[in-house]
Image (cartoon, rainbow, N blue to C red):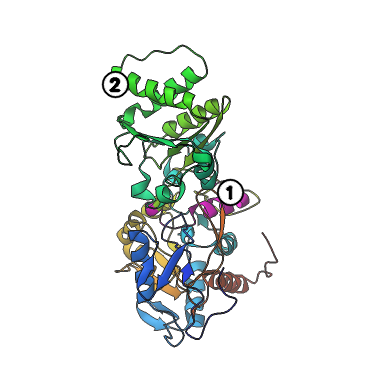
């Protein structure tokens, strides 16, 4: 727990929450000797934030327009003018924001009648996340750590996308001296070969066939495979499942444009769960997600609009969900939006799509300096917020849906992102002569 108030140097706690990826590790220590417990990417992110030191006395600029410094009030006024003069607005970058900031961003989008999309790969797929998630049997990461005696890495390698996942949730021993077995299916071995770990190579294009064969075998249906290597892999996995008390299948973000691979794993896990304890741990993009609060963004958008993204127009009374059509990259690339509200850092493909449009698209960026692109393009208003890494307060959702209260390392001298979004939405309402919004979820 952080102390109730900062010390004389503006420091809340040596311990803080790392928002470098969606694992939201809350055991990070920042000391005079450096950053401890964090992975390499986490250390880099925290060091970058510390380089933009926000301790009292730094007095950072409040805002800028195309590099020219502005006070916050002037920047907000110009941002309102930019957004109201636009033909169509997109609100994106939501995965960098807390749950509270996401709510405020959605309020702004509804007031503007804007499109909303966090830029997730699922939103760009024709089927969206629907086909993959229907009927999922999932669990919290801690349940994996405490219960699963067989962990299967299904064509994924968390060491690349979630560096501390294995350290925190797979490596710890099970209670009662039970032995945990792990199997890596796919091109990557994930962990070093040992008596408790096996690597079963499998081509990615055979993943769906393997999952369907295993499901039929477990369901008691006769099934044969002509591919001998594939058959040997599936038989080995089936035998391991039969010997286990609790099975966890870990999957990663995939490039499958249709979603068949994710769908096949959902049905495999459901079939296993009829026989014994079993669940799936669907890992997202992790380091490549573009923000730590991907799950929180999905939850807020789903609660309000019935879908996690690709919302053509933000309206809780009847939003339109258009996956593969209203995702952020397509809206920008096709020229369907001429103003974009950007929260924090965007993925490289999204930044490139904006750069390709040049002056044809205006930007209102609400972020800290550490998450600004090195070479902003086009007309851009930047309103600076508290450091998203070391000074942000609020809550986020880990990828498994666990609510995490952020522990800031130091006191912010700039407003929180949520406060800036609330001010911007109120200014838009005043310009449109709309009544003030009152306490909406």
Would residue 433 be counted in the magenta stretch? Answer: no
Q: Main secondary structure of the magenta part?
A: helix
Which residue does the numbered mark 2 point to in the structure image? 229
Above-or-below relation of 399 to 65: above
Looking at the picture, tell me which residue is in the foreground, 151 or 352.
Answer: 151
Look at 43% across and 22% down and name the residue there: 239
Above-or-below relation of 424 to 97: below
State which quadrant residue 262 falls in.
top left
Residue 109 % position (x, y): 55, 60
Which residue does the numbered mark 1 point to in the structure image? 302
Question: Does 239 sit left or right of 312 as displayed?
Answer: left
Q: Secondary structure at mark 1?
A: helix
Question: Does 277 sit left or right of 282 as displayed?
Answer: right
Residue 135 % position (x, y): 57, 33
Residue 322 % position (x, y): 50, 44
Residues rendered magenta in the picture:
287-307
State which quadrant residue 1 falls in.
bottom right
């Amino acid at each position: 727990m952080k102390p109730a108030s900062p010390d004389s140097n503006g420091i809340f706690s040596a311990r803080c929450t790392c928002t470098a990826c969606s694992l939201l590790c809350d055991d990070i220590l920042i000391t005079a000797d450096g950053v401890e417990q964090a992975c390499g990417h986490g250390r880099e992110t925290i060091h970058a934030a510390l380089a933009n030191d926000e301790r009292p006395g730094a007095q950072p600029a409040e805002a800028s327009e195309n590099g020219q410094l502005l006070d916050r009030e002037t920047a907000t006024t110009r941002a309102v003018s930019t957004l109201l003069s636009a033909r169509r607005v997109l609100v994106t970058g939501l995965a960098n924001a807390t749950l509270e900031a996401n709510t405020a961003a959605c309020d702004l989008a509804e007031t503007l009648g804007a499109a909303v999309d966090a830029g997730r790969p699922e939103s760009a797929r024709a089927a969206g996340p629907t086909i993959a998630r229907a009927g999922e049997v999932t669990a919290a990461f801690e349940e994996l750590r405490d219960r699963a005696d067989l962990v299967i890495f299904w064509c994924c390698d968390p060491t690349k996308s979630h560096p501390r996942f294995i350290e925190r949730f797979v490596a710890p021993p099970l209670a009662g001296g039970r032995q945990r077995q792990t199997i890596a299916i796919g091109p990557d071995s994930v962990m070093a070969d040992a008596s408790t770990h096996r690597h079963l190579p499998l081509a990615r294009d055979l993943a769906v066939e393997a999952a369907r064969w295993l499901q039929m075998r477990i369901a008691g249906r006769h099934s044969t495979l002509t591919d001998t290597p594939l058959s040997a892999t599936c038989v080995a996995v089936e035998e391991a499942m039969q010997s286990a008390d609790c099975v966890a299948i870990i999957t990663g973000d995939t490039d499958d444009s249709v979603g068949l691979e994710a769908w096949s794993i959902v049905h495999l896990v459901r079939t296993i769960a009829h026989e014994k304890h079993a669940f799936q741990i669907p890992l997202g993009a992790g380091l490549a997600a573009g923000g730590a609060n991907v799950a929180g963004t999905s939850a807020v958008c789903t609660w309000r609009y019935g879908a996690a993204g690709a919302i053509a127009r933000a309206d809780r009374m009847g939003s339109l969900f258009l996956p593969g059509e209203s995702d952020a990259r397509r809206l920008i690339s096709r020229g369907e939006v001429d103003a974009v509200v950007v929260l924090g850092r965007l993925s490289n493909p999204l930044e490139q799509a904006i750069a390709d449009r040049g002056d044809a698209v205006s930007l209102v960026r609400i972020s800290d300096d550490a998450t600004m692109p090195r070479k902003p393009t086009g007309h851009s208003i930047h309103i600076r917020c508290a450091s998203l890494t070391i000074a942000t307060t609020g809550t986020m959702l880990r990828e498994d849906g666990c609510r995490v209260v952020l522990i800031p390392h130091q006191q912010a001298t700039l407003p929180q992102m949520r406060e800036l979004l609330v001010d911007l939405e109120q200014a838009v309402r005043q310009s449109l002569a709309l009544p003030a919004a009152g306490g909406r979820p």
